[in-house]
Amino acid sequence: MLIAGTVPVTDMPLIFGRVEKEGKNLRVDGHYLPCTQGTMAMVSAALATTCHLGLEPPRVLLAGDIGTGKGSRLIYQYLIEHIEELAPRVLALHYCLPIVTLMQKLYTAVEKCHPRPMLIADAGSMYAAKAAGVAPHFDIFTPDPSEMAFLADPEAVHPAYISRHLFEDAFARVPELIKRAYANGGAAKCLLVKGAVDYIVKDGVIVDEIKEPDVPQMECIGGTGDTITGMVTAFTYAELELEQAASISAKANRAAGQRANPTPATSVAEIIDQLPGVFRENLCSWSGICTR
């Protein structure tokens, strides 16, 4: 499993390696990074999941980027040049600036891999995949309702340019937006649309809706969507079916939030800390995975 994304650290070089947890931080290639929102929340949730399943920890490719695009370009270029030799079974792309030409080159490089890795995208990488016209070739996207409006808009190349009629009431119109996204070639094979209701979609058909437990306090905690993407990546690596990996991840995220009893001041790390208990109590009944 390979997770690639940027972190908001000035001048952090491109780093690559296995991720380990040390205290409250994550260590990669001698660098210590906190478990905050964004790529590191995703990585931390993926690590918690692989640890529970007894799988090898994720490999990660990270670079610092505070909006200049420098770190994003380093990540794209490294993957373009080395993806065949890295040969991941699952490649998850997260926070990177949506540079369309580089995403097109990366997808071309991925297509040369045998076997081809499972492709997962969220955030900026998902925007790039849609704008580059390769969304239908990805296996899973994990958008929220406003990002769903972007995927449904055939003209938009970035969420900032969504047609107003699609963006308005996006949270109430998710099923309609899902249909539009598939019709316009803006969706992956499987979608996990994160929100008050989590929609699990396979090939344009909603196969599951997850509403409970309802923990509205999680909406204002940064990183709680990134944790879902991390778990989806790990469960896909564990060879679950795409829709099952998505469904379990959505359920686990809600259950972890409920166990944490969060307030707006709760950190995403405190919610991730609840995942091992959630898995012990529920994973067997949710998935049939009752041992490592």
Image (cartoon, helix red, strand yellow):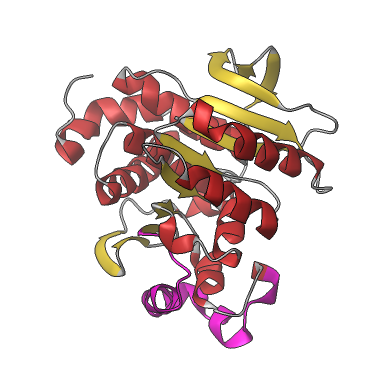
Q: Position of residue 273 (x, y in %)?
A: 46, 26
Seen in the image, is 102 located left or right of residue 195? right
Q: Position of residue 67 (x, y in %)?
A: 81, 48
Q: Nearer the viewer, residue 122 or 102?
A: 102
Q: Does residue 161 show up magenta in the picture?
A: yes
Does the rendering let one see residue 261?
no
Q: Nearer the viewer, residue 218 or 169?
A: 169
Read off the magenta span.
Answer: 160-189
The residue located at (38%, 45%) in the rendering is 254
Does the rendering let one see residue 155?
yes
Tell which residue pokes out farthest to the front in this image: 112
Q: Nearer the viewer, residue 21 or 280?
A: 21
The residue located at (63%, 23%) in the rendering is 16
Quarter of the image with the C terminus in it: top left
Q: Position of residue 72 (x, y in %)?
A: 72, 43
Quarter of the image with the N terminus in it: top left
Q: Main secondary structure of the magenta part?
A: helix
Which quadrant of the structure image shows residue 48?
top left
Against 292, is 10 above or below? below
Which quadrant of the structure image shows residue 181?
bottom left
Q: Position of residue 110 (x, y in %)?
A: 50, 44
